[in-house]
Image: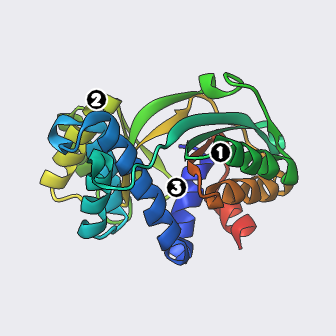
Amino acid sequence: MSGHSKWATIKRKKGAADAKRGALFSKLARAIIVSAKEGGPDPEANAALANAVQKARDNSMPKDNIERAIARGAGAGDGENYEAIAYEGYGPGGVAILCHILTDNRNRAASDVRHCFSKHGGALGTPGTVAWQFERKGIILIDAERVDEEIVMEAALEGGAEDISLDGSQWQVTTAPTEFTTVREALEAAGLAYESAELTMVAKNTVAPNEAEARRLLKLIDALEDSDDVQEVFANFDISEEMLEAVAA
């Protein structure tokens, strides 16, 4: 698992996500609106919408907010027209960074992303610069201190998971995108609570920045995530939880 996933987990533990809950709900709603607009308002017939709704639920987004976002995507709103864009580049330590954007203003989004990279020691690249270093996967994280490996492995493999591994204090269940929902439901049926479950981009290979580079890198990722237009940030770094705790302090 990339260090960025660990960083997200640490931020949740520290409560940093709660301080930005309003901004998070806005981004989740935007993803639901776009998915409903492109594939229709029925989650059972629209896999992208089903995933967007599940992610919103996992982040405790109120049911009313979810339903309003679906209705707006289906044409009951003020007609937002969001454009999906990917920005790619490198951060400190040569870490590959991929940003997924949903924006109603391409120029604003480009300016914000470019500013973040330049301010925090990164370099924005052209399309295709780093995207090849990532692949789409389903990732489900389970607290390893609460659940035995055999229980996780049995439920995950029966659901069709590709791999189960220990990453720090978490079991990481990896799935193909097409099997993600089936595996998540198999874990739920086995009574296993997960800390997070999402379709994401996973790095094929990782690099290990030193502590100074990691500090600058996390500032860059934080700045990107704070941008209203940035939906997701993926990075191919891998460092210990101890170092992450140190640089995040």
Three-letter amino acid code of the residue under disc 2: Thr
Q: CA distance from mark 1 to mark 3?
A: 12 Å
Three-letter amino acid code of the residue under disc 3: Gly
Q: CA distance from mark 3 to mark 2?
A: 27 Å
Mark 3 or mark 2, earlier in chain: 3
* Nearest to the observer: residue 68 or residue 242: 68
Q: Are marks 2 and 1 in contact (CB under 8 Å)?
A: no
Q: Secondary structure at mark 2?
A: helix
Where residue 236 appears, as percent x and y from the top left, is: 64, 38
For disc 2, the marked residue is: 178
Q: CA distance from mark 2 to mark 1?
A: 26 Å
Three-letter amino acid code of the residue under disc 1: Asp
Residue 162 appears anywhere in the view: no
For disc 3, the marked residue is: 168
Colouring: rainbow
Where residue 80 appears, as percent x and y from the top left, is: 44, 49
Q: Residue furthest left?
A: 189
Q: Residue furthest front?
A: 78
**Height in image: 87 above or below 243?**
above
**Height in image: 126 above or below 30?**
above
Instruction: Tell whether 20 sits left or right of 124.
Output: left
Q: Which mark is residue 214?
A: none
For disc 1, the marked residue is: 238
Instruction: Tell whether 5 sits left or right of 130.
Output: left
Q: Residues within 10 Å of mark 2 (few under 14, many from 20)?
A: few
